[in-house]
Amino acid sequence: MKKLIATALAASAMAVVPAASAQDAPSKGEQELAKMLEGRVAGEAEDCIFVSGTSPQMTIIDKTAIVYRQGSTIWVNRPEHPENLDDSDILVTERFGGNFCRLDHTYMIDRTGGFYSGPVFLGEFVPYRLPDKG
């Protein structure tokens, strides 16, 4: 009887291990972001980035981050609730001035129906640059 209980406990413990390691695996969005940032070094985070007349190239990484390319710099913003980011929706931002800041009113709109699909509470903007060749 003791052997049967020990075997059952060992089997149940083994069943838990794969579930825990699956949770530790990076999401598809994290993998996509890592590929974009490959070879780059993070700089000091900022509350705002300057947006000129030619707007930066923006990419929404589903349920992960908002990425802006300005020249050779890639700016990454990880909102407080990244689950609201949907790469098939439209990001709407009500900016105050020429900068894009973490306190700007930002939300998602469904691309097909045009309805509100969730708020986006921006975080800090982290610049990623290629290291200097020295």
Image (cartoon, helix red, strand yellow):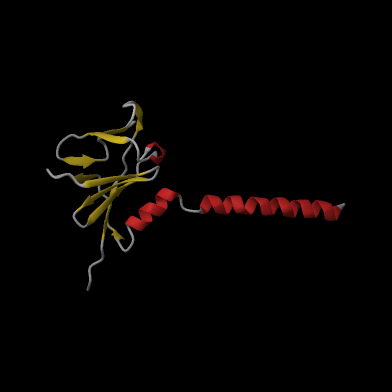
Residue at 36% in and 57% down: 35
Locate residue 78: give its quadrant. top left
Residue placed most toward the observer, 99 or 57 = 57
Residue at 32% in and 56% down: 36
Location of residue 53 with respect to 36 vertically, above or below? above
Q: Residue furthest right?
A: 1
Q: Along the horizontal axis of the image, is 47 left or right of 35?
A: left
Task: Give x and y (percent) for residue 44.
Answer: 27, 55
Task: Give x and y (percent) for residue 121.
Answer: 33, 37
Task: Give x and y (percent) for residue 79.
Answer: 35, 41
Task: Give x and y (percent) for residue 23.
Answer: 53, 49
Residue at 14% in and 40% down: 98
Instruction: Give the total number of marks visible in the rendering.
Output: 0
Locate residue 64: give its quadrant. top left
Q: Residue furthest front?
A: 112
In the rendered image, the quadrant that contains the C terminus is bottom left
Residue at 33% in and 30% down: 112
Q: Residue furthest bottom?
A: 134
Location of residue 95 with respect to 125 vertically, above or below? above
Q: Residue furthest left?
A: 53
Q: Along the horizontal axis of the image, is 17 left or right of 95?
A: right
